[in-house]
Image (spheres, rainbow, N blue to C red):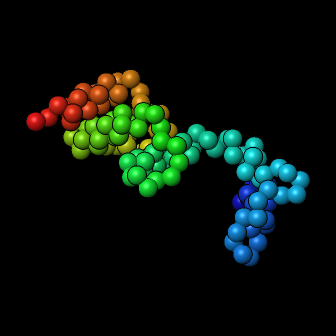
C-alpha cells in the first residue's frame, strides 16, 4: 500500500540522519495533511491512555484539569474489568483499537464505573 503523501514527505525530509529538519521550504508541514485529520478518532484511544503518564511529576506537557478524576475512573474501570467478563471484553477491544475509547464512557457503563470508583474511594 502506498504511503499517504504527507507521510512520504515526512520520511523524505528526515533523510538518512533520522532528524526532522523542520517545516519544508513551502511552509506547509506534512503533518497537516488531510489524512491526519481523518485518523483523529483512531489515535484518541492511545492518547487517552497516555494521559495516565501525568501521574509522574517528570512528565512534560500540560496536565488535563480533570486528571484526578480520569485516574479515579481508570482505577474503577480496572477493578470492574477484573470482575465483569463483558467489561473485560470491551476494554480488550478498545486497547486493540477495534472500538473507540468513547465506548468506555457510554452512560450505562459510566454509571457502573462511578459506583466502582466510589467503592475505591470510600473503602476502609
Residue 57 shows in the view = yes
Residue at figure coordinates x 79%, y 56% from the top left: 23
Residue at figure coordinates x 72%, y 75% from the top left: 17
Image location of residue 40, percent across then percent down: 61, 41
Vertically, is 121 above or below 88? above
Extreme-front residue of the structure? 57
Extreme-bottom residue of the structure? 16
Residue 116 shows in the view = no
Image location of residue 10, percent across then percent down: 75, 60
Image location of residue 64, percent across then percent down: 47, 37
Residue at figure coordinates x 69%, y 41% from the top left: 37
Left or right: 120 in relation to 70: left
Residue at figure coordinates x 41%, y 27% from the top left: 106
Image location of residue 80, percent across then percent down: 26, 38
Vertically, is 99 above or below 13? above
Extreme-right residue of the structure? 26
Left or right: 77 in relation to 94: left
- Nearest to the observer: residue 108 or residue 36: 36
| Quarter that holds the N terminus | bottom right
Left or right: 87 in relation to 1: left
- Nearest to the observer: residue 89 or residue 19: 19
| Quarter that holds the C terminus | top left
Amino acid at each position: 500500500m502506498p504511503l499517504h503523501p504527507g507521510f512520504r514527505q515526512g520520511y523524505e525530509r528526515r533523510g538518512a540522519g533520522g532528524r526532522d529538519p523542520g517545516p519544508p521550504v513551502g511552509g506547509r508541514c506534512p503533518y497537516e495533511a488531510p489524512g491526519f485529520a481523518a485518523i483523529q478518532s483512531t489515535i484518541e484511544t492511545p492518547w487517552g491512555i497516555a494521559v495516565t503518564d501525568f501521574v509522574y511529576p517528570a512528565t512534560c506537557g500540560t496536565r488535563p484539569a480533570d486528571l484526578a478524576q480520569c485516574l479515579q475512573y481508570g482505577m474503577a474501570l480496572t477493578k470492574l474489568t477484573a470482575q465483569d467478563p463483558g467489561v473485560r471484553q470491551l476494554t480488550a477491544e478498545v486497547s486493540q483499537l477495534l472500538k473507540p475509547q468513547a465506548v468506555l464512557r457510554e452512560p450505562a457503563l459510566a454509571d457502573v464505573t462511578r459506583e466502582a470508583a466510589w467503592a475505591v474511594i470510600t473503602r476502609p
